[in-house]
Image (cartoon, rainbow, N blue to C red):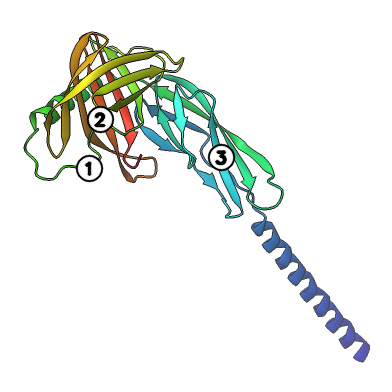
Amino acid sequence: MQIASRKVIAGLMVSALCITTLSSAGSGVEAKAKASLKTKKISVKVGKKKSILIKNKTKKHSYSFTSSNKQVAKVTSKGKVTGIKAGKATITVKEVLKKGKKKKRTLGKVKVTVTGMKKKNVAALMAAALTASMLAGCGSKTDDGLHIENHDWTSTQVIDSAGQPLDLPALTCAAQNGALTITDADGNEQSGTYSLVQRDTNSVLYDLSLDGESGTAVVSTTEYVDADGKKESEYTLILSLPERTVYFRADLND
């Protein structure tokens, strides 16, 4: 009987040891879960934003995002993608170990498709710009950043006089002390001048002259909802010229 009892006790101890070992192994598997891409592809309209999501991110690592075509889609260091013009691009996402040997690991690639504005959307934007101009003088407190100067303006859309999108390279715009310069991706520049016409809480209106063409410029603030459902805002600059209208955006905190 004593021998049988000892065998039973030994069996129970072995079973307990196995359960403990398996439990520890299971915990180790969970702890070693690697980061991976949750977002595989994105479809975004020109001028809009969507975020690339990563599963199982760790504080020991940083994450980088690189666009294959910045003229089509730009991406921030936090993985927020902005549609610049209609076309396709690929965002490469990498994981980098912060300390020690900075080992890099490619998490994957996100396919981005940027679609242009539909006619009704273009018309809505033009109507909004006109409304903002008509509202000048109605406000009491003006946004300190609501001006054409000191912003990194990047184009989001160019349309012709008939409201059709134009397939042009990405443009940047810089303005200071009444002088305005528009530069394309190849470094070609257009120069012009501007002067303040009206200012209110919601918008600022300027007269514009660019390479001999006369027009107007309106700066306002645009609100939108990002991929995470959060409300975001950005500055919008609309240059209206006889043969084309150019839309630019800039971050609120630039």
Quarter residue 207 falls in: top left
| Marks 1 and 3 close (CB-CB < 8 Å) | no
Snapshot quadrant of residue 1: bottom right
* Mark 2 secondary-structure assignment: loop
Q: Residues within 10 Å of mark 2 (few under 14, many from 20)?
A: many
Residue 134, percent from left and from top: 8, 28
The answer to whether mark 3 and mark 2 are in CB contact below 8 A is no
- Look at label 1 and name its amino acid: Asp
x then y, percent, for residue 85: 39, 21
When the figure is inspected, residue 246 is found, relative to residue 16, above or below; the finding is above
Q: CA distance from mark 3 to mark 2?
A: 31 Å
Instruction: Evaluate whether residue 54 shows in this view.
Output: yes
**Circle 1 is placed at which residue position?**
144
**Mark 1 or 3: the one toward you:** 1
Q: Residue furthest bottom?
A: 2
- Left or right: 40 as drawn, with respect to 184: right
Q: Which residue is under mark 2?
A: 148
Mark 3 Cα shell of 10 Å, populated few (<14), some (14-19), many (≥20): some
Earlier sequence position, callout 3 versus callout 2: 3
**In the image, which disc is placed on residue 64?**
3
Q: Look at the numbered disc 3 and give the secondary structure of its residue.
A: strand
Specify the quadrant of the image occupied by residue 48. Answer: top left
Are circles 2 and 1 on residues that touch, CB within 8 Å? no
Q: Nearer the viewer, residue 241 or 21?
A: 241
Residue at far right of view: 3
Q: CA distance from mark 1 to mark 3?
A: 32 Å
Image position, residue 112 (x, y; %): 48, 27
Residue 130 place in picture, x, y as percent: 13, 24
Query: Going 41% across and 31% down the picture, which residue do you hit?
Result: 82
The three-letter amino acid code for the residue at tag 3 is Ser
